[in-house]
Image (spheres, rainbow, N blue to C red):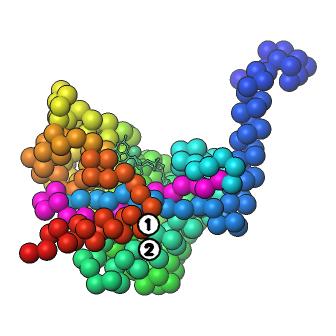
Amino acid sequence: YRAKSAGSGLASYDPEMLTGLIQRLELEADLRLALERDELLLHYQPTIDLADNRVVGFEALVRWQHPTRGLIEPMQFIPMAEATGLIAQVGRWVITEACRQAAAWNAEGAEPVTMAVNVSVRQFDRTDLASEIAEQLTASGLPADRLCLEMTESVLMTDTEENLAQLIRLKALGVRLAIDDFGTGYSSLAYLRRFPVDTLKIDRSFVERLGEQADDAALAETIVQLGESLGMSTVAEGVEEYGQLAALREMGCNEAQGFYFSHPVPADEAHRLLLEGAAAHRP
Ligand code: C2E
Ligand code: MG
Ligand code: MG
Ligand code: MG
C-alpha cells in the first residue's frame, strides 16, 4: 500500500481514518492505565451439562469499565492488546481473577465448577504460559483440572512445534485444554490428533443452523462425532433456542452455552445461577 503520490501528506488521507487512528492510540494508552487502575472485570457465562441441565462450569469473559467510554467489549480492545503486547498483562490478570473466583465458589462445598479462560495465541509466544499458570494455580488453590484454557485453532497452525511443547507442559500440570470456535479455522485432523486437547467448542455459526431454521445439522453433527472418535468432549457455543438445544442433545453433544441459558453476567449473578442450578437438581 502506498499513498497516492509522495509528498501529498496527511491532506490526502481520509480524516475519519486519522480520527480512528488517534482513538486507537488513546485506547492503547488508556489500556496501560486500566491495568494499574483496576478497570478490567470479568463476566461469567455458565456451561450446562446436556445430560442433566446442571451448571458445570463458567467461561470468564473480560470487559473493560472505561472511565469515560463505559463498558467496553473484548472485541474492541483484545485485538489491540494482542498487537501491542499488552495481552501478556491482560491475560495474566484474567487468569488470576478467574482462578481466584473459581476457587472461592468451589470452597463453598457445592459441586465444584470448571472455569474456562480464553488464551490468545500471542500469550504463547510472549510468555512462559505453563510456569505462569502453575504459579496462579498454587496461589489460588484451584485444582488444575478445574481450569480449562480455551484457544483457537491458530495455536495449532502457527509455530506448531513450539506451541505443542507448551501445550504438553500445560497438560502435564493437569489443566484442561479446549479448542474454541472449532470448525472455523483450517486445522488438519492430523494436527488435532497430535495435540493433547480435551474439548472441542463447536462454533456458534454451526449451532445457528440447528433448530427452527434446521437447514443444516450435518456440520455440528460431524464435529460431535469427531470429538467422540478422538476421545474429546464437545461443547456447543451460542445456543439461543430450545430447538438447537434439543438437536444438540440428540446428537450426543456433551455441554452447551448460550443466551438460551444465560448471557455472560457479573460474578454475583453467576453465583446465584450456580446456587439455583444446584438447588434445582437436589434430589
Ligand atoms: P468466545 O471465547 O468465542 O466467547 C463467546 C462470545 O459469544 C462471547 O462474546 C459471548 O458473550 C458470546 N455469546 C455467548 N452466547 C451467545 C449466544 O447465544 N448468542 C450470541 N450471539 N453470542 C453469544 P464476548 O464476551 O463479547 O467475547 C468475544 C470474544 O472475545 C471471545 O469469543 C474471545 O475470543 C474474546 N475474549 C473474551 N474474553 C477474553 C479474554 O479474557 N482473553 C482473550 N484473549 N480473549 C477474550
Ligand atoms: Mg471462548
Ligand atoms: Mg468461542
Ligand atoms: Mg466465538
Q: Quadrant of residue 233?
A: bottom left
Q: Visible in this render: residue 134? A: no
- Kindly identify the residue that appears in the image at 41 percent across and 57 percent down: 265
SS state under label 1: helix
Whether residues under marks 2 and 1 lie with C-beta atoms below 8 angstroms apart, the answer is yes
Front-most of 132 and 50? 50
Front-most of 232 and 110? 110
Q: Position of residue 266 (x, y in %)?
A: 45, 61
Q: Left of 34 or right of it: where is 218?
A: left
Please report whichever mark, 2 or 1, sits nearer to the chain's N-terminal start. Answer: 2
Q: Which residue type does callout 1 highlight?
A: Ala
Q: Is mark 2 within 8 Å of ligand 1?
A: no
Q: Is residue 218 above or below residue 1?
A: below
Q: Position of residue 108 (x, y in %)?
A: 33, 83
Q: Residue furthest right?
A: 7
**Alpha carbon of mark 2 to alpha carbon of mark 1: how far?**
8 Å
Give the class, few, some or many, for how many residues have Cα within 10 Å of label 1's Cα (few <14, many ≥20): some
**Residue bearing the label numbered 2:** 101
Q: Quadrant of the N terminus?
A: top right
Q: Position of residue 232 (x, y in %)?
A: 22, 58
Q: Which residue type does callout 2 highlight?
A: Gln
Give the class, few, some or many, for how many residues have Cα within 10 Å of label 2's Cα (few <14, many ≥20): some
Q: Within the magenta stretch, is there residue 60? A: yes
What segment carries the magenta color?
50-66
Q: Within the magenta stretch, is there residue 214? A: no
Q: Is residue 178 above or below residue 158?
A: below
- Kindly identify the residue that appears in the image at 77 percent across and 30 percent down: 18
Q: Position of residue 13 (x, y in %)?
A: 79, 21
**Residue bearing the label numbered 1:** 267
Front-most of 62 and 69? 69
Q: Left of 258 or right of it: where is 7?
A: right
Q: Is mark 1 within 8 Å of ligand 1?
A: no
